Amino acid sequence: MFRVGIDLGGTNIAVGVVDENNKMLAKHSVPPLAARPWQQVATDMGDAVASASAKAGLSMADCLQIGVGAPGTCNSRTGVVSHAYNLGWDQVPICQFLQDRFHLPVKLSNDANCAALGEAVAGAAMGYQDVVLITLGTGIGSGIIIDGKIYAGMHSAGAELGHTLLVLDGEACTCGRRGCWEAYASATALIRQTRQAQSAHPESILCQTPPEQVNGRTAFDAAKAGDQAALAVVHTYARYLAAGLTNVVNALAPEMILLGGGICNQGEYLLSLLRDYVEKNCFGQKEGAIPEIRVAQLGNDAGILGAAAL
Amino acid sequence: MFRVGIDLGGTNIAVGVVDENNKMLAKHSVPPLAARPWQQVATDMGDAVASASAKAGLSMADCLQIGVGAPGTCNSRTGVVSHAYNLGWDQVPICQFLQDRFHLPVKLSNDANCAALGEAVAGAAMGYQDVVLITLGTGIGSGIIIDGKIYAGMHSAGAELGHTLLVLDGEACTCGRRGCWEAYASATALIRQTRQAQSAHPESILCQTPPEQVNGRTAFDAAKAGDQAALAVVHTYARYLAAGLTNVVNALAPEMILLGGGICNQGEYLLSLLRDYVEKNCFGQKEGAIPEIRVAQLGNDAGILGAAAL
């Protein structure tokens, strides 16, 4: 028997067929073309499920269940995507729709939660029960795994760790609050910090990059070349990131924290700064419950594998 | 069949005998006299268990299990109190000790966790599955109930919500970090804020209280009498408290947040300020996952009832 995972993203609908060992047997992707009625997108999702299972040489009769990871606020209990702004979805009963077509149980969770579950069942956190995945992108995404299962709280609205405070009344955040961790430690925030350093340090090699081309690598590349202004950006950014990780450690004491997103390509260069800060600042310091801090492994497959494991 | 709960506090050892409906049948308390070898304190705990069950008219043969709520860091898996500074305990195998005497299963958790569980099984959070209890005292204690069970993380060291940030690099905290919620919203912090207002506002009726007699009620009493400086203290304090509650909402989306500690005697006067802030600032604002925010009900019995329910 196999299971199907659907990762409904802004750029594509990715479907995978997974066996009982969480091994991906086949994948199929289609663009979502979001600016359509949701029923059309959902029909494409169903077609992609059929294509992926055909690729795997299996029929839907061999399938135990279908899982959907969707952006935005997803109510796992009701199977309804409450809000997904980038898809223009509002109160979409996606589980019922797919269930009517395939006559199989269909489960739903937020894409960040699915990615965390995927890493827990088949990636860097295999064998761990309490895991937090932090994804550094436009914002800070997060998924909490407790006792091997997604924890999402009331109305599946929890696990918004990016929207806990670093500095009360600090930088403006997209959520409407000021001072959220996301406003200091997302890739967007790093880019803003890098541009500020360009303005303040015209002598820095950071200024060789036009401001509009600054990305999450710019400061790291210049820092590695020995540029002092860039080093300061990297160290300040790492401190912001690590301060939020310390909050996660103190609040949840997970066995493992995984980091995802492009910034994590910095690997040990970044991780060693983070581990050092967490050890010095967490409750109980070195005798505290310091989790392993690693980079997520599965990339885009995490969402599919997690959806299949719902 | 009944269960026994032991709440091992700094001021007394409180033991309760509880029936299957979490009703307290009898209680017995003895002073802990902490400055003794732990075996003597543990022997007193055992004697108190025997006394409490005798008071309830029951024999230990009618008892299913014993639960212990202890201060400090408690490893629930091993049954060992890792550190409890105010008792001078270090690596104390309390469960094994009581098990050897009573030949019954003995369970262990931190006292704050037990209080949260007590409120969930028999107090203000009865019927709720995901609950956070915040106790405002010398510090900020916290207990997290997920799916009806205590969540304490790795080595049972988690749920230190008082040691998540309000202001990076802000006020010094007892944990060694700067800027923790506890340093802004504990009773200790409120007393400090009240004394600062005394210094800054010699015209305030706050100054009728000698600084050394300021407590958690001083500012509230003066604010209710219309004193402007005191009103400012109360509103600033409520804002700090509510900002941390908003973090709890965004991170965990519990169904209910309970507040304990003497400051909660302010009741609706304080709660309405907190609810208003949380509604305006949590992720998704009014459409977010806003929990009920209430005052804990059981007082000192919460720890006993929670220990019995471990």
Image (cartoon, coloured by chain):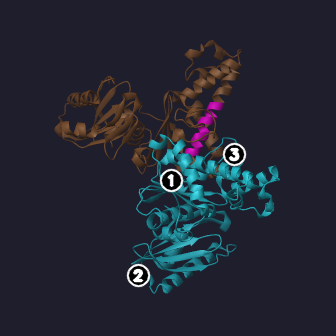
Chain colours: A brown, B cyan
Residue that carries the numbered disc 3 in the rendered image: B178
Image position, residue A7 (x, y; %) = 34, 32
Image position, residue A75 (x, y; %) = 36, 43
Q: Quadrant of residue A166?
A: top right
| Nearer mark to the viewer, of 3 and 2 | 3
Subunit ID for the residue under disc 2 = B
Subunit ID for the residue under disc 1 = B
Give the alpha-carbon distance from disc 3 to disc 2, as whole Å. Answer: 50 Å
- Going from N to C along the chain, the mark reached first, 1 or 2, is 2
Which kind of residue does numbered mark 1 sit on?
Answer: Gly
Viewed as shown, does residue B226 lie left or right of B77?
right
Q: Is residue A128 located in the magenta-colored stretch of the structure?
A: no
Image position, residue B271 (x, y; %) = 56, 55
| Residue drawn at point x = 66 percent, y = 74 percent | B37
Image position, residue A48 (x, y; %) = 25, 28
Give the alpha-carbon distance from disc 3 to disc 1, as whole Å. Answer: 23 Å
Q: Which residues are magenta?
A: A236-248
- Going from N to C along the chain, the mark reached first, 3 or 1, is 1
Q: Is residue A79 above or below residue B48?
A: above
Residue that carries the numbered disc 1 in the rendered image: B153
- For the question of whether residue B38 can be seen, the reply is yes
Instruction: State whether discs 3 and 2 lie on one chain.
Output: yes
User: Label for residue B62?
Assistant: 2
